[in-house]
Amino acid sequence: MCLIMEADDHDGCVLVAPQNFSMVENGVYRSSFPKPEHFGFLTALNLRSIIYLCPEPYPEEILKFYEANNIRLFQFAIESQKDPPTPIPEDTVMAALRVLVDVRNHPILIHCKAGKHRTGCLVGCLRKVQNWCWSSVLEEYQKYAGSKCRQRDMKCIETFDTVSLRQCLLSIMYRYLGYGPNRKRLLYGEENVQTPKPQATNV
């Protein structure tokens, strides 16, 4: 699906969304690779974070835009499908999901190049965590992949083990609730770190 969404902001300017833009959940979005012509639209989303699923470096112009808008970039280097296709590393998917489900990073945008395969794979794994039935997960993946569905991606989604991520979520909840005067805040070592410049964070 390669539609471009347009909307008017309060100044009457046209806001253009990246291709394959869609809302996954409240505060979670997906799209293709953003370009400078999408800056106005991204600003309107009030993004706090970006999940980038490709190994290639980010364009300097867009990094400067993220820095100016206090948007943090998390990069997870998933190679494009090769011939023969190589499996997507489950630990990389798990690391990206940990960033995705942490509400401190929301609103957040997930993207790869076209916003179809690697992005669809991550969203599909999220849907498994949300207990979607397989037919619905597959239908959503196919909606964006179109006629170019990749067996590698579907295999990654189908075999993804949600148990480890659920354990991580329980750990976050436990640390958040906690005990004593600090129970209202997350007890992570990074909690007192200032927002970094949006250079890619390889996890």
Image (cartoon, rainbow, N blue to C red):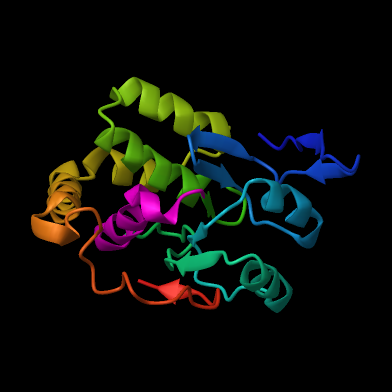
Q: Is residue 3 above or below residue 87?
A: above
Q: Residue furthest right?
A: 12
Q: Is residue 48 above or below residue 201?
A: above
At x 20% / y 53%, what residue is drawn? 176
**Magenta span dominant secondary structure:** helix
Q: Is residue 22 above or below residue 89?
A: above
Relative to 128, is 40 on the left or the right?
right
Q: Residue 73's spot in the image, x, y percent?
A: 51, 67
Q: Residue furthest left?
A: 179
At x 18% / y 48%, what residue is drawn? 173
Q: Please tell me in which quadrant of the rendered image residue 59 appears.
A: bottom right
At x 54% / y 42%, what residue is drawn? 29
The magenta span reads 89-107
Which image quadrant: the C terminus?
A: bottom left
Q: Residue 38's spot in the image, x, y percent?
A: 76, 53
Relative to 189, is 24 on the left or the right?
right
Q: Is residue 139 visible?
A: yes
Relative to 60, is 91 on the left or the right?
left
